[in-house]
Amino acid sequence: MLGWLRAAAVCTTLAFTALPALADTTVRWFISENTPETTVWQRDVARRYEAAHPGTHVDIQVMSGEPYKAKLTTMLQSSERPHLIYTWGGGVMFAQAKAGLLQDITDKMRGDWANDLNPAAVEALSDGGHVYGAPSHQSMVALFYNRRLLAQAGVEPDSLRTWDGLLEAVRKLKAANIQPFTAGGSDKWPLNMFWSGLALRIGGRAGFENAMTRKSGFDGPDFLRASEMFKQLIDLQPFQRGFLGDTAPQAAGQFGDGKAALQVMGNWFVNTQRTQSANQQGIPDADLGWLPFPTVPGGRDDPSDVVGGVNGFLVTKGAPPEAVDFLRFYTSPAIQREAAERGFFIPAARGAGEALKNPIFREMAAHLSRATYVQNFYDQMMGPSVGRVVNDTSADLAVGRIQPREVGRQIQDAWEMEQ
């Protein structure tokens, strides 16, 4: 789901750099940025590849998550489309493949390259037995908290393991005049993380897959209950004033500045709450904690199940062989181990996660390894059109534009139109 850019430069693009006169081949690499430090490292990786492969130039463009998604749709129709594009997999990728915009790299992925990667992660960037890209990292949604602020309100972190405990914590925080949550409502998808987390806890894997395959519907009782439980939280007014106007990076920075006690977000939040804070330090490591998304009474999920995904890069139609070769280099265990050591993300290359130094990342990597099911982000899994409705309905519910019963109905209507 998700890339980030500094809040003050969310819509800024960095143009493709000029092609050196002696370069024989240019690989155009379009990145959805996680943190500025990650991008600096990715540029360094590209320069090292160039040095080892004279005649090949890696040309990089960087944008943040939402502007990236909007720009990519246009760029893929261009004769100068990027050769490597960032992906969250799922229905968006399936639509790109169906439209003939992606290159089948199945034959190239066989053997050592595939053996170096988590098989489930490779499968996530495949469709119909065809591999279209290579995974670089994995993600999961969690509940992050500021230990110091919870203590001030008399909230024990373990109480956040259940939905009822979370609601009670919000009440205590508000009574102590402490802002419970920050949320980037302007981007909408951060609000859907609450709804999709509840849907997973209530219906489990079967709930989502049955709705996807029409054995049931997104307007069924499980999804209605998810909407109603999200409304329980909304009614407590847990988000910062003006949350619908704040982007995800801005909300992360507010948490990093110590202005709120909680945030539901993917594991990349460990870094973004730091880089987006005023002093770019974020809250002290000793104060930052996390827990899996809260459980709900009577839920049919396995407690290890998470909402998350596999991220990586897809190869576009017409990309030169050098693009595939560079992607193999970038997703190799040695390079991905560097990312782990620097704490950029949880890598998808086998063994690279052993280099993670950040204790939260190590804990999350261990949780992912035990998870019986990872539910891909709804807005990615269900394709661009339905995904937009998924995010819109969560935002509309959060501000009272619609009622819980309308959420699943709108998603189901959009899903039926796609079939």
Image (spheres, helix red, strand yellow):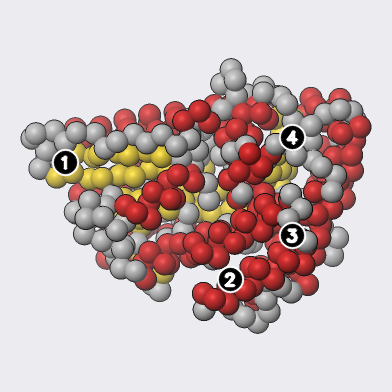
User: What percent of the width, then of the height, locates residue 334?
Assistant: 36, 39
For marks 4 and 1 on the same chain, the one whose residue lies earlier in the sequence: 1
Residue identifier under label 1: 56
Q: Nearer the viewer, mark 2 or mark 1?
A: 2
Residue behind mark 2: 414
**Residue 256 position (above or below residue 79):** above
Image quadrant where residue 159 sits: top right
Instruction: Provide the residue designation for mark 4.
Output: 241
Q: Residue furthest front?
A: 401
Picture coordinates of residue 115 (x, y %)?
A: 38, 57
Q: Give, as a three-letter code, the residue at label 3.
A: Ile
Q: What element carries label 2?
A: helix
Q: In this view, does 116 lie to the left or right of 47?
A: right
In front of the other: label 4 or label 1? 4
Q: Write down the residue under mark 3.
A: 402
Whole-percent x and y of residue 328? 30, 49
Q: Circle 2: is it few (<14), some (14-19), or many (20+) Cα within 10 Å?
A: some
State how far apart marks 4 and 1 are (Cα): 50 Å
- Separation of marks 4 and 2 at Cα, in angstroms: 31 Å
